[in-house]
């Protein structure tokens, strides 16, 4: 067990293209993004995924829209689910841990308006919660392969409107939703404060 943990830690430290459980190379092509600790994929890769290009290696995927509900309801990547509260992360982890049929992958892709703050933050929170859930069996993870959609929904909408539902884009700072924004930002601060109180333990490698 100890040798396995040491080997996994070394692989995660040395290679940028391995899954979080250090057992495989990532199946989607990644690019260097704003957040060096996260796996970033392009909008075109998301389109390829939706169109079935990776069906031979990916058994299931979920697109997770981390924007506030008024943004999501105005328009989102077709098939995406809206997870904007940190407490909702548990809903994802509560999905039965699937032993990937025929060795196929189960992946998650996070995004927000620009994929600069909310999407990456939720991606990290999911990985942290997954590590906690599997702390006695490191480096096992329920979701070892997670990505961030580079540049977020705004860029995706501008280049791939046909893959959006509804086909529209509402900015977070839209003037008609100032009260909604204040509400969700206040909630977000309270969730983050709660997380900080519960944390304080040094985490193993992402």
Image (spheres, rainbow, N blue to C red):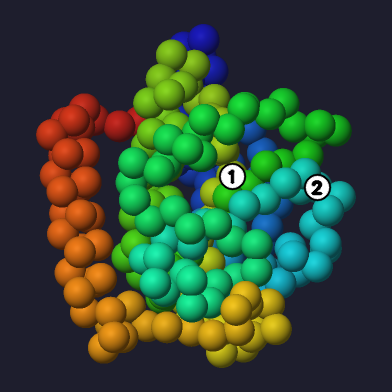
Q: Which mark is residue 145?
A: 1
- Horizontal and vertical percent position of residue 99: 72, 26
Q: Do callouts 1 and 2 mark residues in contact (Cβ within 8 Å)?
A: no
Q: Residues within 10 Å of mark 1 (few under 14, many from 20)?
A: many
Residue at 62%, 75% (x, y): give it.
165
Q: Position of residue 40 (x, y in %)?
A: 52, 63
SS under mark 2? loop
Left or right of 192 in this view: 98: right
Mark closer to the chain start, 1 or 2? 2
In the picture provided, is 3 more to the left or to the right than 206? right
Q: Which mark is residue 38?
A: none
- Image position of 83 with respect to 116: above or below: above
Which residue is denoted by mark 2 in the rendering?
57
Residue density around tag 2, few if under 14, some if 14–19, many if 20 or more, within 10 Å? some
Image coordinates of residue 11 in percent, x first then y, are 53, 36
Q: Nearer the viewer, residue 92 or 47?
A: 92
With respect to residue 111, does 104 lie above or below? above
């Amino acid at each position: 067990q100890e040798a396995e943990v040491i080997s996994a830690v070394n692989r995660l430290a040395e290679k940028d293209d391995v899954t979080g459980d250090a057992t495989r190379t990532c199946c989607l092509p990644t690019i260097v993004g704003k957040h060096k600790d996260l796996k970033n994929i392009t909008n075109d890769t998301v389109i390829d995924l939706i169109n079935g290009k990776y069906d031979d290696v990916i058994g299931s995927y979920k697109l997770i829209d981390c924007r506030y509900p008024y943004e999501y309801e105005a328009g989102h990547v077709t098939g995406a689910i809206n997870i904007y509260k940190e407490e909702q992360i548990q809903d994802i982890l509560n999905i039965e841990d699937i032993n990937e049929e025929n060795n196929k992958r189960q992946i998650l892709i996070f995004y927000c308006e620009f994929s600069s703050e909310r999407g990456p933050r939720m991606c990290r929170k999911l990985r942290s919660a997954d590590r906690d859930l599997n702390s006695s069996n490191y480096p096992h993870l329920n979701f070892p392969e997670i990505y961030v959609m580079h540049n977020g929904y705004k860029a995706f909408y501008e280049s791939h409107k046909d893959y959006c539902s509804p086909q529209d884009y509402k900015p977070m700072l839209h003037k008609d939703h100032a009260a909604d924004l204040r509400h969700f930002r206040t909630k977000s601060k309270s969730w983050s404060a709660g997380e900080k109180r519960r944390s304080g333990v040094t985490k193993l490698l992402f």
